[in-house]
């Protein structure tokens, strides 16, 4: 069994004292920041990435992954206890989770969310271990044309699937690609869009873009809104769910996991859509749909399982193909690239310790999360009562320090302020920033592959349609675009 | 009826895309375009800028048709304070050191909030500065002087 020996290698890496410690720190920090209301996983990663920057590659990626699923997990605590989700993926958990909390069942709701997420996380990780090598093997046959079409598909899907307007989503992708162009062109050595500024010849740093676009813009948007947030302040009693709760939550968890695992691999859809879809499914098949929205435990278990399974399987395309399916994965990819790791099918052969160590650490991390969350939930709850007027200046400060520490150059801090202004204006104009980030990260790869594909094909663009795998991606892209204009799909996107 | 163009959400978004797309195309004229087979550095950005222009035009026209407004108020005041706090951090860190930069950034950023209680903010600034120094200067050993110039 090759899988077993690989896993043994992975656990060997992940169980080293150093990596175990970084996994723990990542998970704990991720939960800590992710729990804060209005701070989603994206902002958490963007903010904490600089801490991992100076570590060697393997502990860095283990810690980053820990931060990511810790933040994901912390977000669900927030959505149960505060009627304000930190990110779209946990918006659905809000509906029934907050109702459970209001009915004095915050404890069981939190425990259910934790256990459902743990189950989903484990299954998701297993899927990475199983599907990764197969997909990677297949992807080894990809040439430049295939990669170009695949990226095009991922970008179009991410633009179309986000909430909000599809055309604006596409425009945001293009804008992201253009930001990715900034810097020296690798083929010609020519500096593009650098306006004579030496710092810009290296391109725009990804922490700069992510922090400006998500943290700064988000904070200003929060500050201008006047709605007071509702925080559940009652005491937490009776953490453990009853036997009946467990029975009620079991199948929804399994269904949610299955749905989330499928959605997670698809480009652009990710956790948000899967938790929404699985909630709808549970409501449809429930004996008494009226309970939903009034504290149904299925309405917590299923979406939580779905978004965690999706968050986990989203690693598959990122790790094996080097193509991130969501904005969060785009950040992870950018972080890996900065660490000098080229993700793609070769990563499993070149760096088996990294790949399998990461997978093993995900199991450990998911276990750590349950341990961290169930007994310590009181601590996280207390964090929720920290007023926003203390939080946001601190977040801004850490973003500044983080940005500065990556390049040791104040220019990056100034640039972040500029992107923050742009990001805020875009948020107000209801242009989703996630597709922009994805475009920005994939931009250089897309250009490189496009150039190579057309060079090999002697300038004949039909190459994208005559090679079968590439043609399949292109057809999928067209289908996605066509579905986008169908009114039914529009209604579904608006419904989230 | 004359359509109200002020605060028209898609009109502004469309204009923004058109301006950015147009600028990209114009700037990219300085870069060799090449051919489809051998793309120059100007090829990709020119095409992208063109696409952005088209999307912008579509969004702009739609805005004229639907006339949808930007939701809520523009938060220029918090945006200005937050932006200023970030810029000040970059400006002060090199020149005055880590401690002044963090304190000033926190104070200025806090001014973006709806209420500003000076004592509370001062306390927050002291606590967070101590925390940042502990974590970043001692924990992560970032080589920035606590007080004083880099040079």
Image (cartoon, coloured by chain):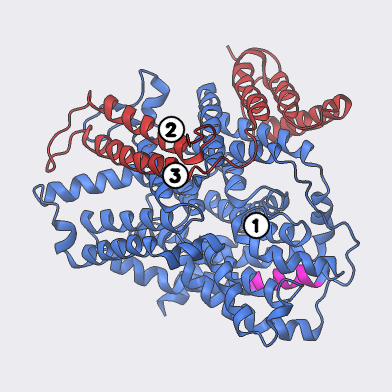
Chain colours: A blue, B red
Estimate how packed mark 1 is, as few (under 14), some (14 to 19) or many (20 or more) residues with alpha carbons within 10 Å.
many
Q: Nearer the viewer, mark 2 or mark 1?
A: 2
**Which of A309/A289 is in front?**
A289
Residue A112, magenta (yes or no) = yes
Could you give the CA–CA distance between mark 3 and mark 1, rounded to whole angstroms?
Answer: 24 Å
Left or right, A268 with respect to A279, comes to left
Left or right, A108 with respect to B97, comes to right
Q: Secondary structure at mark 2?
A: loop
Residue A333, percent from left and from top:
44, 50
Residue A160, percent from left and from top:
42, 56
Looking at this rendering, what residue extends furthest in the front direction?
B1
Q: Nearer the viewer, mark 3 or mark 1?
A: 3
Estimate how packed mark 2 is, as few (under 14), some (14 to 19) or many (20 or more) residues with alpha carbons within 10 Å.
many
Magenta stretch, residue numbers: A108-118
Q: Determine the chain carrying the residue at label 1.
A: A
Residue A469, magenta (yes or no) = no
**Which of A196/A48 is in front?**
A196
Which residue does the numbered mark 3 point to in the structure image?
A436
Could you give the CA–CA distance between mark 2 and mark 1, rounded to whole angstroms?
Answer: 28 Å
Please tell me in which quadrant of the rendered image residue A15 appears: bottom right
Tell which circle, 2 or 1, labels the residue nearer the N-terminal end.
Answer: 1
Tell which circle, 3 or 1, labels the residue nearer the N-terminal end.
Answer: 1
Q: Determine the chain carrying the residue at label 2.
A: A
Kindly identify the residue that appears in the image at 62 percent across and 33 percent down: B74
Which residue does the numbered mark 2 point to in the structure image?
A204
Task: Kindly tell me whether residue A37 is visible in this rendering.
Answer: yes
Tell which circle, 3 or 2, labels the residue nearer the N-terminal end.
Answer: 2
Residue B113, percent from left and from top:
75, 32
**Which of B110/A338 is in front?**
B110
Quadrant of the rendering where the N terminus of chain A is positioned: bottom left
């Amino acid at each position: 069994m090759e899988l077993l020996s690989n896993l043994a290698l992975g656990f060997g890496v992940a169980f080293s004292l150093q990596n175990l410690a970084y996994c723990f720190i990542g998970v704990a920090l991720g939960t800590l920041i992710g729990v804060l209301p209005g701070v989603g996983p994206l902002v958490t990663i963007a903010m904490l990435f600089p801490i991992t920057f100076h570590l060697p590659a393997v502990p860095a990626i283990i810690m980053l992954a820990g931060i990511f699923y810790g933040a994901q997990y912390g977000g669900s605590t927030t959505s149960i206890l505060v009627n304000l989700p930190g990110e779209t993926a946990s918006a659905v958990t809000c509906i029934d989770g907050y109702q459970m909390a209001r009915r004095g069942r915050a404890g069981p709701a939190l425990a259910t969310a934790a256990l459902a997420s743990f189950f989903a996380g484990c299954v998701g990780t297993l899927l990475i271990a199983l599907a990764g090598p197969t997909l990677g093997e297949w992807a080894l046959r990809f040439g430049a044309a295939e990669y170009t079409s695949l990226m095009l598909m991922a970008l179009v899907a991410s633009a179309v699937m986000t909430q909000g307007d599809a055309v604006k989503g596409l425009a945001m992708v293009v804008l992201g690609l253009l930001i990715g162009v900034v810097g020296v062109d690798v083929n010609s050595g020519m500096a593009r869009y650098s306006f004579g500024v030496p710092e810009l010849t290296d391109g725009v740093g990804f922490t700069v873009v992510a922090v400006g676009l998500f943290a700064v813009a988000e904070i200003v948007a929060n500050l201008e809104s006047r709605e007071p947030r509702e925080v559940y302040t009652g005491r937490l009693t009776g953490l453990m769910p009853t036997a009946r709760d467990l029975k009620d939550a079991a199948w929804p968890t399994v269904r949610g996991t299955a749905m989330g695992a499928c959605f997670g691999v698809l480009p652009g859809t990710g956790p948000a859509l899967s938790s929404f879809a699985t909630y709808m499914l549970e409501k449809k098949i429930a004996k008494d749909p009226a309970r939903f929205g009034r504290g149904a435990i299925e309405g917590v278990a299923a979406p939580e399982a779905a978004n965690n399974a999706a968050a986990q399987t989203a690693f598959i395309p990122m790790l094996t193909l080097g193509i991130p399916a969501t904005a969060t994965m785009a950040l992870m990819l950018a972080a890996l690239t900065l660490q000098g790791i080229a993700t793609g099918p070769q990563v499993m052969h070149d760096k088996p310790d990294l790949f399998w160590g990461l997978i093993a650490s995900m199991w450990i991390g998911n276990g750590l999360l349950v341990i961290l969350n169930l007994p310590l939930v009181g601590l996280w709850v207390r964090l929720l009562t920290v007023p926003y007027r203390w939080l946001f200046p601190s977040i801004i400060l850490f973003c500044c320090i983080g940005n500065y520490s990556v390049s040791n150059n104040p220019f990056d801090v100034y640039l972040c302020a500029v992107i923050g202004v742009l990001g805020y204006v875009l948020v107000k104009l209801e242009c989703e920033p996630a597709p922009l980030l994805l475009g920005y990260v994939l931009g250089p790869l897309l250009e490189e592959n496009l150039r190579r594909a057309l060079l090999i094909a002697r300038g004949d663009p039909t190459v994208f349609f005559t090679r079968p795998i590439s043609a399949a991606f292109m057809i999928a892209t067209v289908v996605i675009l066509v579905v986008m204009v169908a009114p039914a799909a529009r209604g579904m996107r608006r419904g989230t | 009826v004359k359509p109200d163009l002020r605060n028209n959400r898609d009109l502004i978004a469309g204009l923004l895309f058109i301006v950015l797309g147009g600028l990209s195309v114009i700037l990219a004229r300085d870069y060799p375009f090449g051919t489809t087979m051998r793309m120059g550095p100007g090829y990709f950005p020119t095409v992208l800028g063109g696409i952005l222009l088209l999307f912008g035009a579509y969004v702009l026209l739609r805005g004229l048709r639907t006339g949808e407004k930007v939701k809520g108020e523009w938060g220029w005041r918090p945006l200005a304070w937050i932006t200023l706090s970030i810029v000040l951090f970059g400006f002060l860190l090199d020149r005055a050191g880590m401690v002044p930069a963090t304190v000033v950034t926190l104070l200025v950023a806090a001014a973006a909030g709806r209420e500003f209680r000076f004592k509370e903010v001062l306390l927050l600034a002291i606590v967070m500065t101590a925390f940042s120094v502990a974590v970043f200067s001692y924990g992560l050993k970032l080589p920035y002087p606590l007080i004083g110039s880099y040079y």
